[in-house]
Structure formats: C-alpha cells, structure tokens
Amino acid sequence: MSDLTHPAQSLLDDLSGFRVEVDAARERADIVLDRAPLNVITMPQRDQLRLVFEALDADPRVRVIVLRSTGEHFSSGGDIKGFMEATPEKVSALAWNVAAPFRCSKPVIAANRGYCFGVGFEISLACDFRIVTDTTLYALPEQKLGQIPGSGGSARLQKMVGVGRTKDIVMRSRRIPGPQAYDWGIAVDCVADADLEKATDALVEELRAFSPLAQRTAKKLLNDTEDAPLSIAIELEGHCYSRLRSSDDFREGVEAFHGKRKPAFKGS
C-alpha cells in the first residue's frame, strides 16, 4: 500500500469563492464564481479552479463546461494582498493555473457580465468562447499597480487583437466595453444583459450536437498550431483529418447526412 500524499488531495474539500454544478442530463458543468459582489479570485482559488477543470475534463458526464458568476460582475480581478504574500515560486505558476480552460479537451464557454478585470479577464481569455453583454467591461488594469498582467492576459490578447490594440489595453489600463470586444473578435456574441443565460444555454446545446471526438480534435489542433508555420499546421490538420476518417462518429455523420436525419454521435 502506497503512503504517497499530494498537496492537491485536500484542495477540493472546501471550494473557495466558487461552486460547481453538474447537470448530467444536459451533459453540462457550470463553474460559478460566487463571492459577491465583485467575485474577487484569491490565490488558493486559482489552484482549486485548475483542479476542477481537470476533474471535469475527466468526467464522462460532461460535454461542455461553462464558467460564469453570480451577481452583476463576473470578477473584479485577483486578491491584491494575496500577491504580496505569495512566494516567487507561487506567483510564477499563476499562468499555468489560469490556462486550465485552454488545456481542457472539452469546449469551455465564459459568460461575462459587468466587471471582467485582471485574472477574471485572463481566465476568460483562456476559454474557447466568450459571450459578453452590454454591461461587460474587459480590462487588464495592472499598470495602475506598477505591474503587468501575470497570467497570460497580454500574450493571449495580442494573439487575438494584435500588438497595437493590446498595448492600448495593457499600457493604458483601458476598459473595453462588451460591444467593442465583440467588434474586435474577443467575444463570439454580445447580447442584452438579461439574455446572457439564454445565449449561453443556446451555445451549450449547439456544441453538444457535434461529435465529442471531433470537437476535442479540433480544439487540440487549433491550440497546438496557433504558433506553427502554415505548412506545419496544414500537415497536422491532415493527420487529424485522416485519423477521424476511421471513427465511429464520422461514419455516423456520413450515414445521417445521406439518411437526412440528425446524427447520434458517441465520441468514438
């Protein structure tokens, strides 16, 4: 019998500032930031969020993950005092924890309303889809503290909107309203605040209709080839396409297409 222990074993016993809801019938899991009114994200919470994403990634009941919040604000950012108390080693791992939605093989949706600042913005940028409302404000305000974003925010944003717009946001601590974020391609949809839940539900159901295997393959391919030369990206795309040709889901998709019926994908 092994006597090995791991620091993570007790981290999930008492979730700090958020809760997890799994709806097996809808193949959906919600990670809900729940520290009203501003949903400040603490240092221990970052470790817990990473572990929860990893646990949900391995949960066969879950097809789609939603990251959302209670109240009128998604998150005003991180716990400033916690940064001052953390060791350099702890701080250097911040981006790894916040990248958990990116590493997750399943589709992850961020539903953002109100303030979405600092790490709240950074973890949303690590998700696959962002839905904003007319109340949403995105910002990386670290310059006001004599700092820079430390959890991947400026790097991910630069990939999405270019270096000029990223400098404008980061170096001026500018707040970007939801409609502007949608225009810039940061968000996939911008809706009235009262419609955020409805829009999120609709996207979940849309994603559930596709093959889980094809979705995982597409996400990993796009993540892995983001920095690759075009020739390498096309080569890897071809390999992934070839592997999916022999899948049960592809066969089912072709048969459903010719049979003019909805496919029943199983993820194999």
Image (cartoon, helix red, strand yellow):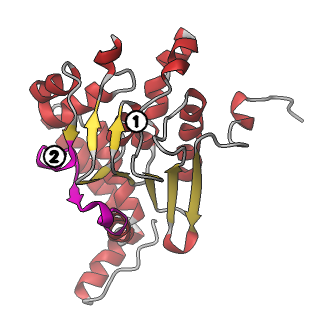
Q: Which residue is outermost to the front?
A: 37
Secondary structure at numbered mark 1: loop
Q: Which of 207 and 165 is in front in this view?
A: 165
Name the residue at 90% across, 36% down: 1
Residue 216: quadrant of the picture: bottom left
Residue 27 percent coordinates (x, y): 50, 68
Indicate which disc residue 185 carries: 2
Q: Can residue 214 be seen in this view?
A: yes
Q: What residue type is labelled 1?
A: Ser
Classify residue 29 as left or right of residue 233. right
Q: Which labelled disc corresponds to residue 229?
A: none
- Residue 33 in the figure: left or right of residue 116: right
Element at label 2: loop
- Please say whether residue 205 is one of the residues in the magenta stretch: no
Q: Residue at x 36, y 30 (%)?
A: 118
Residue 192 is covered by the magenta coloring: yes
Amino acid residing under circle 2: Gly
| Left or right: 184 as drawn, with respect to 226 | left
Earlier residue among tags 1 and 2: 1
x then y, percent, for residue 119: 40, 32
Magenta-drawn segment: 177-199
Residue 254, compared with residue 8, is above or below; it is below
Seen in the picture, residue 8 relative to 21 is either above or below; the reply is above
Counting from the top left corner in percent of width and height, residue 49 is at: 54, 40
Residue 122 image-quadrant placement: top left
Judge by depth and name the residue closer to the eye, 55 or 72. Answer: 72
Q: Is residue 60 visible?
A: no
Query: Which residue is nearer to you in this view: 264 or 184?
Result: 184
Mark sitting on residue 76: 1
Where is residue 228 drawn, in percent x and y? 21, 32
Q: Where 133 falls versus 137 (above or below)?
A: below
